[in-house]
Image (tube, rainbow, N blue to C red):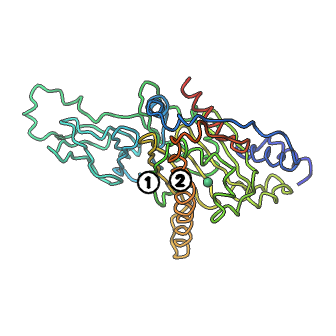
Amino acid sequence: MGKDSKDTMASGESLKPHMQMFSTFRDKVKRQDSAPLPPSSEVPVEMYLDPDLLKREQTELFDKTPVIVGHASMLEKAGSHFTHDHLGKPLLIVRGKDKVIRAFLNVCRHRGMRLVAEEGTGKTPVFVCPYHHWTYGLDGTLKNTPLKDGFEGVDLSCRNLKPVQCAEHSGFIWVQIDDTKPIDLPDFLGTISDDLDSFAVADQLTYRSDTSLKKANWKLIVEAFQDGYHVVRLHNKTVGRFFIDGQTANERVGKHIRAIVARTSFEDALELPAEEWDDRNHVSFAHYIFPNTIMVYHPDYISHLGLFPVGTDETLVTHTFLVPKLAETDEEKSHIARSYDLIENGVFQSEDYFVCENAQRGMASGANDTLLLSGYEDGIAMFHDILSDGFKA
Ligand code: FES
Ligand SMILES: [Fe+2]
């Protein structure tokens, strides 16, 4: 390839949005650009302690936004379903005979029994309420009512399951509790949708999806994943050695953040043409997707984290580990199992959530009125700007 075409690629004309960011970041590092860092800033500790603020976050941010409740690969067949209770409403998510994924309130329309009582995933041709056996189709239609003559004069046609807005997009299942505005994921995601396509998120399979309760405000956990300052320090016994200290970039995309942390092999990218830049090995990409999603693109696998506040100091964290194909050989099985264990237990639980829980413990002590952010923690300041804009929307 000649110099001209190389420069054209590097100028970003034909690069996908996340590789455009890679290109800008690479050029800045290559120039040894010493532009000043973003300014230091502070966040009041009250933001992690105030129950009224949490209520507003849930009603004004979470309820009005499409939120990921699972990966589409969790519902492969007609009748595959799972329950989801972390958004303040009992939800039943199901793939219909027409392949469409729908969400309903998991509440029987007779006397309110939880229709699918079991937690987690299952498969069924119809939903039969355990109490009096009212039976619903996969599309939520009431199909059968035992001893129907007892409901003489009642219009049972308006007793179908209550639907909740739901869409399948970019490989994920999205639910929006508020039904006053339609879900519009292309508009909501902007170019983050291109990134999800570039990382083939829709083609991944779910290896595991685990939920754990962490004793920290949900924002502290988001912040742990917007923070390039800690990577080589907090993670010095696990993955820290794979990264370069202080070489990070954050880019706001609407309500979301696209982030880069340079891996040690990033130095190679400084001399390589754009065609050879490797978005999984020269850097680690991550996304914050408003309001509660973190995506981390490891070299071989993808972590999706969904954060669901329970209280000001409690958050349910669902980690879904996505793989390009399920392991077949013992060697492949062992590789995925070891990677999952390193990331979930070694890095996230023992390191990232460990610091979130221990930051939360001292939050009300009076030691700090604010949390201090350096210019290397600008992703956290960006996150707080997004939240503040979300309240104004
Ligand atoms: S409560 Fe469900 S059938 Fe009666
Ligand atoms: Fe971390």
Element at label 1? strand
Residue 328: where, in percent of width, then height? Answer: 51, 71
**Pair 2/1: label in front:** 2
Of labels 2 and 1, earlier in sequence is: 1
Instruction: State the residue in front, 302 or 383.
Output: 383
- The percent coordinates of residue 263 (x first, y second) are 73, 58
Q: Which residue is mark 1?
A: 212
Could you tell me which residue is drawn at 67 percent across and 36 percent down? 252
Say which quarter of the image contains residue 52: top left
Report which residue position mark 2 lands on: 353
Near-viewer residue (256 or 213) = 213
Secondary structure of the residue carrying numbered label 2: helix
Which amino acid is tagged 2? Answer: Tyr
Query: For the residue with label 1, is its CB less than 8 Å from the closest atom of ligand 2?
Result: no
The outermost residue toward the front is 366
Q: Residues within 10 Å of mark 1 (few under 14, many from 20)?
A: few
Q: Position of residue 138 (x, y in %)?
A: 31, 44
Residue 161 against residue 213 in the figure, above or below: above
Quarter the N terminus occupies: bottom right
The dot on residue 78 is none
How many discs mark residues in the rendered view? Answer: 2
| Mark 2 in CB contact with mark 1 (< 8 angstroms) | yes
Asked if the residue at label 2 sits under 8 Å from ligand 2, the reply is no
State left or right for residue 139 relative to residue 231: left
Tell which quarter ligand 2 is in. Answer: bottom right
Task: Give x and y (percent) for residue 378.
Answer: 69, 40
At label 1, the amino acid type is Ser
Q: Is residue 215 left or right of residue 38?
A: left
